[in-house]
Amino acid sequence: MEWKRTAFDWNQARAFLVTAEEGSLSAAARALGLTQPTLSRQVAGLEEALGVTLFERTPRALLLTQAGVELLDHFRSMGHAATRISIAATGQSQTITGHVAIAATNLMATHFLPPILYALQAKAPELQIEIITSNRLSDLKRREADIAIRHGRPTDENLFAKRLRNATAHLCAASSYLDKVGRPARAEDLSDMHFVGAEYPEQLLGPLASRGVNLTKANFNYVTASGTLSLALVRQGLGIGILPAEIVDAYPELENAWPDFEPIEIETWLVAHRELRTNPRIRLVFDHLSDAIG
């Protein structure tokens, strides 16, 4: 196939690349922080510039055309090159001003980061800190964040990771809920109680069963991807939640619902791209978070 020789906008190329990788305009728009109509215009502009159709638009999905498939690897190479340029440029910066993006779960961001960032402000008052709250793992290599606080060890060798600490999660509930339904005397009593669960409660069934707590999805009357909302629901007395010990200790209305429950270990890792460790502002924030959380 002969391609049309033309210049095109990198924003259009990035729009195509992310749309192809995410599988839909809506997901790609969220990933790029754009509106869906803007993203759609960028993809259409690239198609017009190249003189080819990159996607077949069906009612349910976007499908790459043959031309789109053939071009995708080339655009991926361009994306990797652009990322390497951005990382190298960031690594050469020697100022303690500027932007640093930190990715963390909303529970970590809400309950742990504010006092940590308050102390950081005294060290570097000119920094602009962006906090990305999501349970989805941010892609550091594509610069979705500069630093990530994760609850699992990264496997990518291009990332610098430091293990900070282990915490434990327990079954906890509001005293008002346990006053109403009764405090469990045996593990079997928990199967008759309501639970507040994460986005995919079925993933909790195995770890709970291995600790003698046998539940089904029907026990999870309230499910949310938001850790802060999960905490609010438990505090309201709507059921039992699995929360870090520090959170339980912070709220007097909460108590350990089943003291014999074997705690669930929670690892905390601080992660950044290796080359970003040469940047003073990234290093300052990384080391500050390491000291404060660790």
Image (cartoon, rainbow, N blue to C red):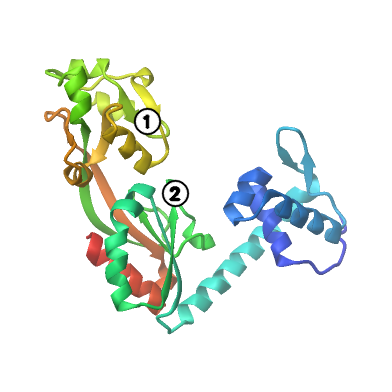
Mark 2, secondary structure of its residue: loop
35 sits to left or right of 254: right
Percent position (x, y) of residue 20?
67, 48
Assign the C terminus to one quadrant of the image.
bottom left
For the residues marked 2 and 1, what is the alpha-carbon distance in whole angstroms? Answer: 18 Å
Q: State the residue position of label 2.
A: 134
Percent position (x, y) of residue 18?
64, 53
Q: State the residue position of label 1.
A: 203
Percent position (x, y) of residue 66?
79, 45
Residue at 79% x, 66% y: name it: 8
Q: What is the quadrant of residue 47 in the picture?
A: bottom right
288 sits to left or right of 282: left
Assign the N terminus to one quadrant of the image.
bottom right
Q: Amino acid at mark 2?
A: Ser
- Pointer 2 or 1: first along the chain: 2
Q: Is residue 197 above or below residue 246?
A: above
